[in-house]
Image (cartoon, rainbow, N blue to C red):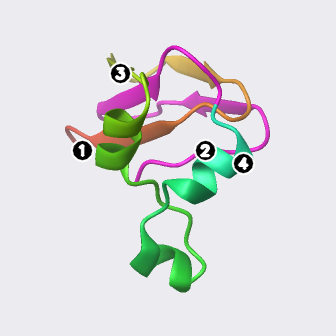
Amino acid sequence: GPHVDSYDVFLIQISGTREWEIGDNFFLSVKEEYDNMVEAASAKGVRILNMSSLLLETNYTTVKLQVEPGDCLYLPPRVVHCGTATSD
């Protein structure tokens, strides 16, 4: 699900394709992350963001990217992202 990491992320697509939805206009603070977490997931120790509330309560926007085998995607710390496989 949608989340942020507190470290640099390099995503290398080995096989299949994946669609990534990535925050494109600011870094999410720790407070904003916790204010917009899915309660049921956070109660179990999983950090998944409620994108509906994040999009409604802020001027947050996202961009969608399709990655294919051999592509590398870099995400700086605190950038919201969510990947969904679109093929095997």
What kind of element bears circle 4?
helix
Q: Nearer the viewer, residue 57 or 13?
A: 57
Q: Going by the image, does 86 lie left or right of 25?
A: left
Above or below residue 77? Residue 39 is below
Mark 1 or mark 2, whichever is nearer to me: 2
Q: Of callouts 4 and 3, which one flags the residue occurring earlier in the amino acid sequence?
A: 4
CA gap, disc 1 to disc 2? Answer: 25 Å
Q: Quadrant of residue 58?
A: top left
Residue extent of the magenta highlight: 1-27
- Quadrant including the N terminus: bottom left
| Residue that carries the numbered disc 1 in the rendered image | 88
| Residue that carries the numbered disc 4 in the rendered image | 30
Looking at the image, the residue that sits furthest to the left is: 87
Q: Of callouts 2 and 4, which one flags the residue occurring earlier in the amino acid sequence?
A: 2
Q: Of callouts 1 and 3, which one flags the residue occurring earlier in the amino acid sequence?
A: 3
Give the class, few, some or many, for how many residues have Cα within 10 Å of label 2's Cα (few <14, many ≥20). Answer: many
Q: Amino acid at mark 4?
A: Val
State the residue at coordinates (29%, 46%): 52
Q: Going by the image, does 34 lie left or right of 86?
A: right
Q: Which mark, by number, is residue 68? A: 3
Q: Position of residue 19 (x, y in %)?
A: 30, 30
State the residue at coordinates (61%, 45%): 32
Q: Nearer the viewer, residue 64 or 60?
A: 60
2 magenta-colored: yes
Give the class, few, some or many, for how many residues have Cα within 10 Å of label 1's Cα (few <14, many ≥20). Answer: few
Badges 4 and 1: C-beta atoms under 8 Å apart? no
Q: Amino acid at mark 2?
A: Val
Q: Which mark, by number, is residue 4? A: 2
Q: Of callouts 1 and 2, which one flags the residue occurring earlier in the amino acid sequence?
A: 2
